[in-house]
Amino acid sequence: MPKNPDDRRLELLQGTLDMLILRTLQWGPQHGHGIGQAIRAQSDDLLRVETGSLYPALHRLEKHGWLSAEWGVSEANQRAKYYRLTAAGRAQLSREQDRWSQLVTAIGRIMNPAPAGNPGSEE
Amino acid sequence: MAPRQDEFDDEIRGHMALSMKERIDRGEDPKAARLAALKEFGNVTLTRDSIRAVWRPRWFDAIDSMVHDVRIALRSLMRARGLAITVAATLALGIGANAAIFSVVRQVLLRPLVNRDEDRLIYIRQSAPGHNVANTTFSVPEIEDFKARATTIAAFGDFSTIEFTMVGLGEPRVVQSGVVSGSYFDVMGLRPVLGRLINAGDDGPKADGVAVLTYRFWSTALNRDAGLIGRKIRLGSRPATVIGVLEPSVPYPADTEIIANVVTSPHHLDATMVTQRTHRMTELFGRLAPGATIDDARAELVAVHAAMVREHPDAYSPKADVHLTVKPLRDQITAPARTILLLLLASAAVVFVIACSNVTNLILARTVRREGELAVRAALGAGTHALRRTLLAESLVLCGTGAVLGVLLARPLVSVVGRYAARFSVRALDVTVDPSLLWVGAGLAVLAAVVLAYVPRLPSSHAPGGLATGGLRITAGTNRRLRLFAVTQIALSFVLLAGAGMILSALVALQHAHTSFDTRQVLAIDVPLSLESFGPKSVAFFEEATRRIATLPGVERVAAGNYVPWRDGGSTFGGTVPFAVEGYTPADGEADPRARLRNVTPGFFAALGVPLVAGRDFTDEDKAKSELVVVVSQSVAQRLFPNGDALNRHMWWTDPYFGKPAPRRIVGIAADVDDVEVAPKSALTIYHPLRQFPFAGRLFVHTSGDPYALVSPVTRVIREISADQPVERAATLADVRAQVLAPERLNAFVFSGFAGIALLIAIVGVAGVLAFSVSARTREFGVRLAIGSAPRHLLARVLSEGVWIAAIGIGAGVLTAYAFGVVAASYLDQMQLPNAAAVLGAAAVLMSAAVVASLMPAARASRVDVLQALRSE
């Protein structure tokens, strides 16, 4: 729960960070800072990823073999670690995406029940 | 695969730079941008640690949490120091005893011999159960038959033991020597550490005399002098050259100083040795032929032996019932130690069970005391798993400490047990502490730890009230379990105590057995003459020696003989010889009576304090050429002359060795003495005057003062007569007997040690259970006192509780001991069931121990402060 009622930022749902990272990297290799910024920008500033969660997550994904990493030079002229989606990572992304849409559908059905007599409605 | 540590820092630094650049690009002041970036990033150290944690292998986390658990365990054990010390010490005793004995058992029974291909090496033995002879050994003609007929044996090795007076290596002395043919060392698969060993070139009467030093003799008596190779020595009357030193190996069949070739021993070359089938003195070994198994060899050798017996009926009396046994050499060497070591191992295992059940009891009581703590932890979210892990960590710490102490304790124990086992198997001579000790210790500790962690009941989340109870509540189940373990300890301690009691009472009986000898004042001295000087020359020597020694101050009587009581039991004269007497015909099928044969000088009976019951002692008139006479023991007279008319009747030896029967007149009857068995049994003995049977080598000096003060004067007198004459092993008969009894005394000592440890642990166990039960019932006692119970009633109550536990334990122990005895008796020949004295003694000891153990808790119960007790909840 946000401390400030004006603060419109959302808490990340547990278990979704990995999926967001994988998704972000679909457009090409990126370093940690870039991934964080991309999630923020694409969520319209609603989602902000804490570095304390982001970096361990990146390393976890790398350890699983879903990401590969290489060192390059960033826009700030500093050494930076660039992460790239691997084939295994791509497969994992599609699995997580499927599960996510199932979850959304299921929760949606409960929260916004369809009018009676129209059970096949879409969300 | 995992990134290096500094890469984490680089990555974070890169992130900071980007974050700052972004802000500066937006137009922020660089300083402010830097602070904002830092602030946004949050805790750098924490992030770095979480990244590192991602890459850490799983086992690292496991160890990490174990270290954590162990730290907690250490802290909580520090608060219960008394308990921790008791538990660790108890376990140390249990683990130490087991590890030490296992280590000895492994090295004595399981380790291979150093001999090349020792599993192909067999030992062949001939026995005559009908004559009660366990090992008749073989004669040369017998060995030749085996060599000619056996195909499953690649080669035979033979070994006979003989004494030589050796001159040329240090003082002239009598050495035990093996006499072997050239095939022996090759068959045994032994190598020299220096020089060479005896080979086929050293066989035959024309070869030069050669001798090999055994490693023990070379390293202990000769300072490992490599220059001894090539040294000329004299063995008896023959010259020999030292040609090599044998590698360290199990000395079997005899622990000799040297091993020489056949030519050094005139006896081995004479006709008796070579042609007489009944002249048996050689041990036989064989190496299996390629492809042959021990079973093949056994079948073939037994068949060859049976044929031999058929072909030479004169050499194998049907009554002797000769048998042939064939077994691997290693089994033969370890056999005598097997029984005693397995018994020790069983005792150690029993001690371990007692120790474990005692420790379990202590831990169980402790867990009940901390049920509150565990309940709080369960309520705060610790799962069953986590609680078990805590308990496991605690018991691991305890058992680990116990194991370390136990292994430390085992090191000295190994040498004690090794020296002890060396009396039964030569293999135990070089037992050392080996690494298996550590594994056994660690294994036992882990076993104990797991048992300990799983015995206590955990607070179940379904059972409410764990938190609600402020005080201590023992459930009936816990109490039952505590008592069960205490009863187990008492029962097993009883088994060990009864066993030790049995061994002790046997020892006491032996030590107090009446021997008829005047053991304290008689000094026995070995004066071994070399083989050639037997005969009239030896008689002259001993008569001269006794005459001169008798004049020494402090000497009351002196005599010579051929046999030192008990000490010479292993010699030829430890056996018996068949004889016949005038007027007594053995019933059909009954064997001739057998008696021990002793040669003594006049005055022997008086010198050793053996009274003459009838007739006369020998005199100087009983000469070689005069009438043959003997003195017989009272048993001979009574058994063979039931009418009491033994005197002046005749006896003669019937063994073929004596040739044509020569009747000897019985001139005296001496009191019975048993000079072979330490526990006096049969005493059929026949004495010859030394002049008529000139074979002696022992002196007996009866003294008025300290017998040992006479050793050097006597030695001086003998050296005056013969400068090269060895004078050895002077000891009073009392000390000889003590020496012979040493194994029994050691048995008693070791098993009493085990029983003592068990008893100690059991006392701690009973005291612990009662103390716990008293402290848990403080309130109950308070109430009892408040409503008028006298303190001594409470005292009696607790005491009787202890007595009950002990009584049930003793009852269970009697059953266990009986079952154990029955099982053991089926495996061991000499196993006897414990006698009544041992059983009653053990019961009495345990009962009084239980009372003593109950006294302290009982006293505490009777001193409970009523007010405090009532307020305790």
Image: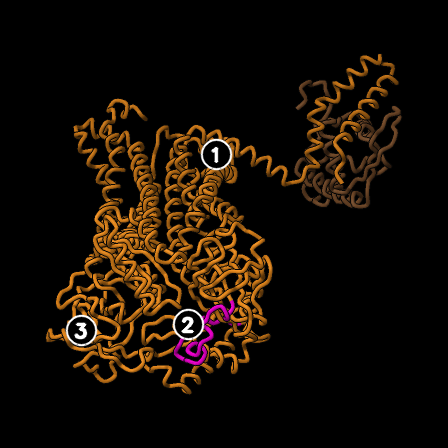
Image position of B547 with respect to B797: above or below: below
**Chain ID of residue with mark 3:** B
Labels 2 and 1 in the same subunit: yes
Q: Which residues are magenta?
A: B261-286
| Disc with the residue nearer the chain's start (3 vs 1) | 1
Percent x, y of residue B36: 78, 16
Closer-to-camera residue (B249/B744)? B249
| Left or right of residue B486: residue B449 | right
Mark 2 or 1: the one toward you: 2
Q: Which chain is orange?
A: B
Mark 3 or 2: the one toward you: 3
Mark 3 or 1: the one toward you: 3
Q: Would you call the spot at circle 1 few (<14 residues within 10 Å), some (14-19), or many (20 or more)?
A: many
Image position of B242 with respect to B448: above or below: below
Q: Say which residue label 2 marks.
A: B281
| Left or right of residue B426: residue B859 | left
Inspect the magenta stretch and tell me whether residue B495 lies in it.
no
Closer-to-camera residue (A25/B713)? B713
**Chain ID of residue with mark 2:** B
> Which residue type does callout 3 highlight?
Ile
> Which residue type does callout 2 highlight?
Met
Q: Say which residue label 1 marks.
A: B378
Q: Would you call the spot at circle 2 few (<14 residues within 10 Å), some (14-19), or many (20 or more)?
A: some
| Left or right of residue A33: residue A117 | left
Q: Is residue A35 visible?
A: yes
Q: Residue drawn at (24%, 63%), measured in percent from left and top?
A: B674
Q: Say which residue label 3 marks.
A: B666
